[in-house]
Amino acid sequence: MPKARLTRVRSKQPVTRARIIEAAVLLTAEVGLEGWTIRSLAARLDSWPQVLYHHVGDRDAVAHAVVEEVVARFPLPDPELPWRPWFRELLLGARPVLREYRGVARRLALHGPTVPSALPIIDHGVALLARSGLGDEALAGYTFLLSGALSSIAIDDDRARLGVTPEMGDLTPHLHAGGEGLRAFGAALVRLEAGPDARETYAGYIHIYTIDRALDGIGARIAELTGDAGP
Amino acid sequence: MPKARLTRVRSKQPVTRARIIEAAVLLTAEVGLEGWTIRSLAARLDSWPQVLYHHVGDRDAVAHAVVEEVVARFPLPDPELPWRPWFRELLLGARPVLREYRGVARRLALHGPTVPSALPIIDHGVALLARSGLGDEALAGYTFLLSGALSSIAIDDDRARLGVTPEMGDLTPHLHAGGEGLRAFGAALVRLEAGPDARETYAGYIHIYTIDRALDGIGARIAELTGDAGP
DNA sequence: ACCTGAACACCGTTCAAGT
DNA sequence: ACCTGAACACCGTTCAAGT
């Protein structure tokens, strides 16, 4: 087949770093952070891979810029709030943003918050924990709270992408051999298999449960360190 | 260049499913679960990709078999132990195994425990939490404890593989603009950059901190549900 | 400075034969 | 049943020119 167009119909704007990142963010919303390639992104811009290298860098540099942009969209809670509602609001508020840009939570959870837009969140969060009684443990506590919440979103991203994996189906025959613990596990698998809505509901429940138990854990530690017997 | 050997020097044993998985486990110990390809694994067996497809299946099926094998090597705590020491021993004991086979923790954390060898652990762990006071929340609590610990290992796997990423270096100039929270974060980055031993020490600290705070969180919830005021 | 053509060295996977 | 040859349709990345 001959080329359809001898003269390429180009979009008027030149390809710039800003336009590349904008297109990458949009593409991430459609197919997730691992769903696009440097080639498909170039095609979306009606351009070529080498142009992206020229303006931004390799695939990892483009993905990093997307993460920076997505983190910048997290709603920030009122800094006057006490530590517990501040973190609860931050983590619950980040979820809709991260669910829109699937794959970003996974990268944040595994690679750490290596983007400038995360720094004000870290700064306030760590300082807040430190002066609320965690002292030197504040950074460890912050890491614990954030990575727990991010992981729970990353797991759901994977489930949404993969659906019910064959491996999960292969497990079913083994479940009847077990006791009451496996019965509860089997019931959860059934909920996951019941469709996207049921999966979504279950993921939301696990996410909130994860956040609240993590906050409980930090609360217990603060009580222990400050000698507070608790309510 | 002509072929070095017209008649291939083959290992005596035929390629079987068991030998493929054994080689994949060994290769995972060397280069991590994402470090080998179906082609490099075939070469290690002095064989060809299609043979692996014939005996085991696609890359994902081979990786799944590796995870199954690695989980089977977790040391299991005494089932008579109360919930807190049982989980603490399980999670601390799993770490050396998962650190030997890098990448497995990440897959377990993100894909869930979809291997048969995980089922006895789930069965006992969930039942233990249920009868210790968590009741219907036992599976959510179990998920919370496991995914927290697994994520913390997965993060260290990535750090060990990637070393200090350029992104982390790019962050340094921003750190001085912040307050006390960022100073603590910057100090942690310095520890990560100080070399493999310092990174390892820090990762171990974070891992134990994560486990203990997660256990605290579940402990607080059990106390809340059972009306126990705690010690 | 920015864009284009062409290639390199890989992937996972599959088809069609061989023995 | 098991092994081998060959190819398909991709990747990320780089080199060498063009304008």
Image: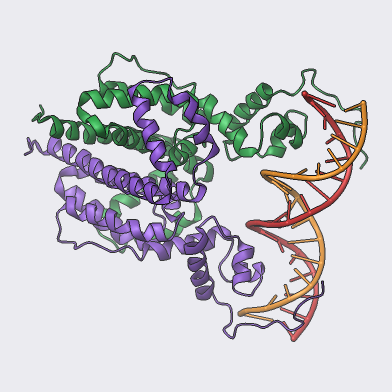
Chain colours: A purple, B green, C orange, D red
Taking A231 as reference, is A86 above or below it?
A: below
Q: Residue at x 26, y 26 (%)?
A: B129
From the viewer's perspective, tell me whether residue B74 is left or right of residue A126: right
Residue B91, placed above or below residue A40? above
Give above or below for A132 relative to B85.
below
Q: Residue at x 41, y 48 (%)?
A: A156
Q: Which residue occupies 61% across, 39% down?
A: B35
Residue B230: where, in percent of width, then height?
11, 29
User: Is B73 left or right of B51, judged from the image as shown?
Assistant: left
**Residue at the extreme front of the image, as rendered:** A194
Q: Nearer the viewer, residue B126 or A147?
A: B126
Q: Quadrant of the C terminus of chain B?
A: top left
Does residue A63 lie above or below A144 as drawn?
Answer: below
- A87, A163: nearer the viewer: A163
Q: Position of residue B184 (x, y in %)?
A: 29, 50
- Tell how many labels: 0
**Picture coordinates of residue A93, whole percent (x, y):** 28, 58
Residue A101 seen anywhere in this rendered image of the structure? yes
Residue drawn at point x = 74 percent, y = 24 percent? B15
Where residue B128 sits, quadrant-wise, is top left
Q: Is residue B174 left or right of residue B21?
A: left
Residue A36 spot, x, y in % from top left? 57, 60
